[in-house]
Amino acid sequence: MRRLIPTGEAARPVEFAQDAQPVPAPDEVLVKVEAFAPNRGETFLLEAPKPGLLPGKDVAGLVVQAAADGSGPPAGTRVVGHPPMGGWAEYATVPTHSIAVLPDEVTAVQAAALPLAGITALRLLRAAGAVTGRRLLLTGASGGVGHYLTEIAAAAGAEVTAVTATAERGARLRELGAVAIVHDVGAAEGPFDVVLESTGGGAPAAALARLVPGGTLIWFGQAGRTPATVDFFDLLAGPENAVIRHFHYAGAPYGPDLATLVRLVAGGRLHPEIGRRADWSRTAEILIDLRERRIRGKAVLTIGAPR
């Protein structure tokens, strides 16, 4: 079979290679991949790939070999999966605890856009606690996580202020339920009960100053790649007893969260936004565009003719 492997070259981050079809472990299914979605974090890994890196964590396709231990769906089932690696290939193995069955209402392209960003959004909101009637400030809202966070949190009754770089993206986030759009954290009118911060640099300090007393900042990324600087003495002039909480989405099983996301999409309550759909022969080009932030919404690469 063919798979995409890293090159370590900025102008051509991946290239095709021939590889043996993967052999699933007893608790894994073998999936014929129809669509996959790169994530921005994967573009970072490709800048200096470690030996053996096989990218690909968001896939959708058809089970062609069921798990030997009897867990998971039978062959012939359409699924979305979140494998630990290796999804940018014609076939991928996925643990049965990290897949969800797809109904006819959800296409492979929609499904491939769900796993990492959607699971992160769900788990962030669980970490935030009950959000109905609470004010949330969301930085870095232009990406896939921000899209899902805005739509799910607004539907749950939160008042979401989204920080986004462009007016176009801001308009879309308003359609998804954001009550306010700003282009800089300093322009956000607080106070906020919860801040969901993913950009780094000066954003965490500015966001902390806009919390209610005892409010929480959940720090889940550093997309700007600039370390945050927070001065302890500046906090003394801000809200009392603010909480800074580190967050990382990882932790199997992923299947239940994927099933929730699929159910919301099938019911018309969550709308994956596909910024670019292309054949996987254009993966290197798409990765460069992702790196340069020229794609708004999720990019999905297709193999063959997915539904």
Image (cartoon, grey):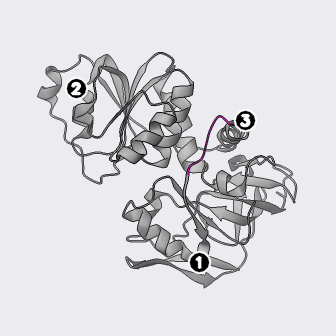
Check the image and report above or below for 18 versus 189. below
Q: Which amino acid does label 1 sit on?
A: Ser
Mark carried by residue 281:
1
Residue at mark 2: 209
Specify few, some or many for label 3: CA neighbours under 10 Å numbering under 14, 14-19, or 20 or more: few
Q: How far apart are marks 1 and 2 (CA)?
A: 46 Å
Residue at 74% over, 68% down: 305
Residue at mark 3: 267
Range covered by the magenta-colored residues: 267-273
Which of pointers 3 and 2 lies earlier in the amino acid sequence? 2
Specify few, some or many for label 2: CA neighbours under 10 Å numbering under 14, 14-19, or 20 or more: many
Which of pointers 1 and 2 lies earlier in the amino acid sequence? 2
> Are the two marked residues, 1 and 2, in contact with CB atoms closer than 8 angstroms?
no
Would you identify the image quadrant in which residue 167 lies? top left
Q: Which amino acid does label 3 sit on?
A: Gly
Q: How far apart are marks 1 and 3 (CA)?
A: 32 Å
Magenta highlight on residue 269: yes
